[in-house]
Image (cartoon, helix red, strand yellow):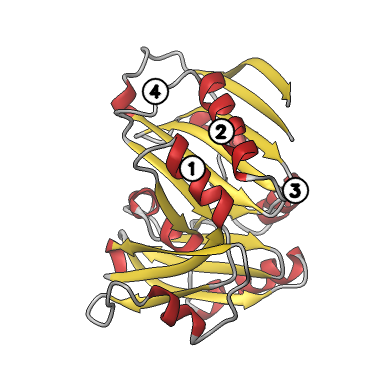
Amino acid sequence: MSYQLNTYISTERELPTDEMIFSIVQMPTGFLFTVTTTRGYLIKAGEVRHEGASMSDLMATLRGVVGECEISTIGVASLELVVSTPKFVLIPEHLYEAGNDRAYLESVCHLDAGMTVCSDYIESIKAWSVFVADNNMVSASRIVLPGVRVRCQYSKLLGDYMLRESENSDTLAVHVRKGAADYVVLRNSKPLLANTFVCDGFDDTLYFALDMVNRMGLDAEKLKVMLSGEVTYTDFDTLRHYFGDVRLNNGKPLRILEPEFQHLHSYRYVLGLS
């Protein structure tokens, strides 16, 4: 198991702990982690690569990451684990019953061994997201990061940060994962449309994004596109040829390309092996 950490230093004052957000995004080959401010500034970003790690290995790695990030896990504005998963369902608030999460999922998909069922409330659409996540990752996160909020990609796409981003502009949030992509269109901090399409490659992801924009009559030049998930620089650059404002919402180092982060500069690079 290995991890790397990039640290970005802002020219602003040192921030107190309660203005920081510590976020982990789980991927098939590991996870990304970021430390951002409540206003969206990137402080630290890194990536952990692993395959089938045990809970003890994940706990040791998470503790190492927290130590390298030099932050307290107590008193931060938000601690979150975001799971990128194809197995999820959205249940309207008035239909949701606590204790039935597994039954909700089993009605639409097969649950594999080693997976745990989680749920998270999405205020913006008054619904619960019920989804599966890797049991070792969830257990390790809850031990190392007490109070961590476990969310799936839809919960993140429809969360407070995305709503703020769409306050004054139409916004298209796109989450790319293996074999599919999730799309959410927002306007004036309200979701207009959410959908998921099967995608064999990024060309399909681009096609469905353009199709949604055309069908909804959106202005591609003025539209804000928030890209997250399993994306490469090539994917990011490709979208910039079709849309006027493309931003990477992963928190990976590519995010330094965003205009509001130009006053940040790379301070150090750390590579750790364990």
Upstream in sequence: badge 1 or badge 3: 3
Q: Callout 4: 10 Å neighbours few (<14), some, many (20+)?
A: some
Where is residue 75? Give x, y as percent: 29, 28
Foreground residue among 79 and 63: 63
Where is residue 66? Give x, y as percent: 51, 26
The answer for how far apart the CA atoms under marks 3 and 4 are is 27 Å
Where is residue 153? Give x, y as percent: 50, 60
Q: In the displayed structure, does residue 272 sit left or right of residue 99?
A: right
* Outermost bottom residue: 107
Q: Amino acid at mark 4?
A: Ser
The answer for how far apart the CA atoms under marks 3 and 2 are is 15 Å
* Contact check, label 2 and label 1, Cβ < 8 Å: yes
**Residue position for label 1:** 141
Give me the disc on residue 62: 2
**Residue position for label 3:** 51
At x 63%, y 71%, the residue is 112
- Does 222 sit above or below residue 213? above
Q: Quadrant of residue 20?
A: top left
Foreground residue among 269 and 11: 269
Q: Give the quadrant of the C terminus.
A: top right
Q: Amino acid at mark 1?
A: Ser
Front position among marks 4 and 1: 1
**Residue position for label 4:** 72
Q: In the displayed structure, does residue 169 sit left or right of residue 176?
A: left
Upstream in sequence: badge 2 or badge 4: 2
The answer for how far apart the CA atoms under marks 2 and 4 are is 13 Å
